[in-house]
Image (cartoon, coloured by chain):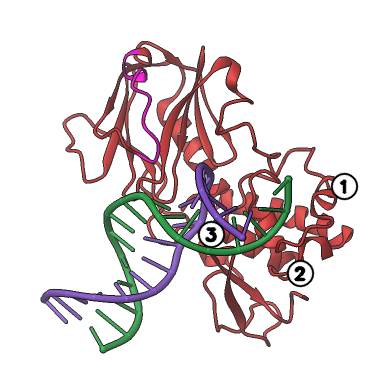
Chain colours: A red, B green, C purple
Amino acid sequence: MPELPEVEHVKRQLAALIGTSARVSALEYFRKDLRFPLPKALLKSLPGKELLEIERRAKYLLFKFDDGWLLSHLGMSGAWREIKPGEEKILHDHVRLSFANGPSLIFNDPRRFGFIDWVAENEKTSHVRLEHLGPEPFDESFTPEYLFAKLRKRSAPIKSMIMDQRLVVGVGNIYASEALFRAGVRPSRAAGRVTREEAAKLITEIQIILKAAIDAGGSTIRTYKSADGSRGSFQSRFFVYGREGEVCLSCQKAKISTKVIGGRSTFWCSRCQPK
DNA sequence: CAACCGCCCTGGGAGC
DNA sequence: TGCTCCCAGGGCGGTT
């Protein structure tokens, strides 16, 4: 489900929902086996702490407290939503985070690929989930020189490379296909055969599409919903994702192709995206 | 190290 | 209407 735009959208909605100076009144687990075990100590240590801010790093939500961060990954099907007093829990509600002077939030995740962890104050860059992450796509360090150097001499498909969170974070399966389409590079091309100019174009297109998707509230393919239960709309603006067999919206000639690359469905136009 | 593959889990949709 | 099969936006861990 969620790539960077969806996580960023959820972050903004949660921040607006909770406001400032909210103090945790309770953290409850309804099951302890999400993808990774939930830190049991949090049940006692989190209540009483004041939420200072909600941040996003890569596809992680980070609830900032004065001595660390509650880290939340949505996996493929995870969602945070507000639960009103007296409202019944529903299937796959796994965690509840309540604020004394604010709302109660529920983490729901049918597939349980999501997880929650604690990042201590001094672990922001060394925590096991964060230490290998590459630059944010909007960071000034994500330059054509950086990308081109990383791609050089690599035989893996360019699509697999830009989805590798060590290279750049936040680009998942959907936006990888879309960004490569806009950049005019076929997803199957060996990374080392991407030119310097194409690398520069790819950065631009990754940034453009992620920004546009954030503004549209993300993309909803199947189940993704943001914190207020609404669905994203960016899926209506895909050029290639899920359009197998349809005439290309750009050249109006070739039909959109698909195949599995790196275990993920991949879409491209054979005319607009040279090998 | 790089590349690849299987796997975690559940639900929705397609096809019969 | 109901069954079975296939697929899904992420990331880890093992193997070659």
Residue A244 appears in the picture as rendered: yes
Position of A3 with respect to A191 (left or right) is left
User: Residue A241 location in percent, x, y?
Assistant: 56, 69
Residue A6 appears in the picture as rendered: no
User: Residue A266 location in percent, x, y?
Assistant: 58, 69
Q: Is residue A35 magenta?
A: yes
Residue labelled with disc 3? A234
Tell me the residue at 55%/42% (across/down).
A59
Q: What stretch is highlighted in magenta?
A: A34-44
User: Residue A256 location in percent, x, y?
Assistant: 61, 80
Element at label 2: loop
| Above or below: residue A164 compared with residue A82 | below
Tell me the residue at 76%/69% (across/down).
A184
| Above or below: residue A47 compared with residue A273 | above
Residue labelled with disc 1? A145
Tag of residue A184: 2
Residues under labels 2 and 1: Cα distance?
Answer: 19 Å
Element at label 3: helix
User: Residue A208 location in percent, x, y?
Assistant: 70, 54
